[in-house]
Amino acid sequence: MKTRIFALALLFLLLIVGSSNLSAQNRTYSENYGGTLNLGLGLGGYYGYYGYYNQALPVFHINYEFDVANSFTLAPFLSFSSYREGPYGNGYYYHESIIPIGVKGTYYFDKLLNANPDWDFYLAGSLGFSIIKSSWDNGYTGNRNYYQDGSPLFLDLHIGTEYHINHKLGIFLDLSTGVSTVGLAIHK
């Protein structure tokens, strides 16, 4: 499944690059990617994070990119997701809130692709851990540790693009092995 997602993402990226204005031969690439606040909504496949919940969940994601080197940024991030599962036995529900925290390293391929300045194209990796708060409804007498077998550490891979609406605002699509998002990029 993850291989199919990356194949589709790569095809999407190639189609965008192919349809972009790639004819600007003398363009200067001094673009800074840092100083960008990214706000995203999406679906996260938390099976990879915890090893037990194999279903997509709605996710809110926020990160802030800092320039580290030419075409490379680091972005501390925080995400949030929550779900309820059940009913079990006598009508009890299981509740869980998931807060992944970490850092995302991103390399931009705009210069290599000679891309139109309205577009950014990147590959990235995220490394972090998840804070997991789980509970059962009051009165539940079964095994309360049933869903505690996953690791809070994770590593995700990303491929994405951003379209700059103007100098200060862009929209992005980030396809990932963990949490894929669409959202707004607010540039300084």
Image (spheres, rainbow, N blue to C red):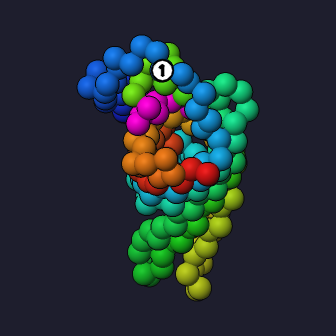
Q: Residue at x 63, y 59 (%)?
A: 99
Location of the N terminus by quadrant is top left
For the stretch drawn in magenta, the main secondary structure is strand
The answer to whether residue 105 is seen in the rendering is no
| Residue 181 coordinates in the image, percent (x, y) | 44, 49
The stretch drawn in magenta includes residue 28: no
Mark 1, secondary structure of its residue: loop
Tally the numbered discs.
Answer: 1
Going by the image, does 174 lie left or right of 67?
A: left
| Occupied quadrant, residue 67 | top right
**Residue position marked by numbered label 1 in the rendering:** 27
Q: Looking at the image, which residue sits at the far bottom?
A: 139
Q: Residue at x 39, y 48 (%)?
A: 165
Going by the image, does 82 lie left or right of 144?
A: left
Q: Residue at x 31, y 27 (%)?
A: 20
Which of 183/154 is in front? 183
Going by the image, does 156 lie left or right of 73?
A: left
Q: Looking at the image, which residue sits at the far right?
A: 68
Query: What span is in magenta?
Result: 117-127
| Residue 133 coordinates in the image, percent (x, y) | 65, 67
Which of 41/83 is in front? 41
Q: Amino acid at mark 1?
A: Arg
Going by the image, does 80 lie left or right of 68?
A: left
| Residue 120 coordinates in the image, percent (x, y) | 46, 33
Q: Is residue 78 above or below residue 164?
A: below
| Residue 91 coordinates in the image, percent (x, y) | 42, 81
The answer to whether residue 169 is seen in the rendering is yes
Which of 16/48 is in front? 16
Q: Residue at x 62, y 68 (%)?
A: 134
| Occupied quadrant, residue 135 | bottom right
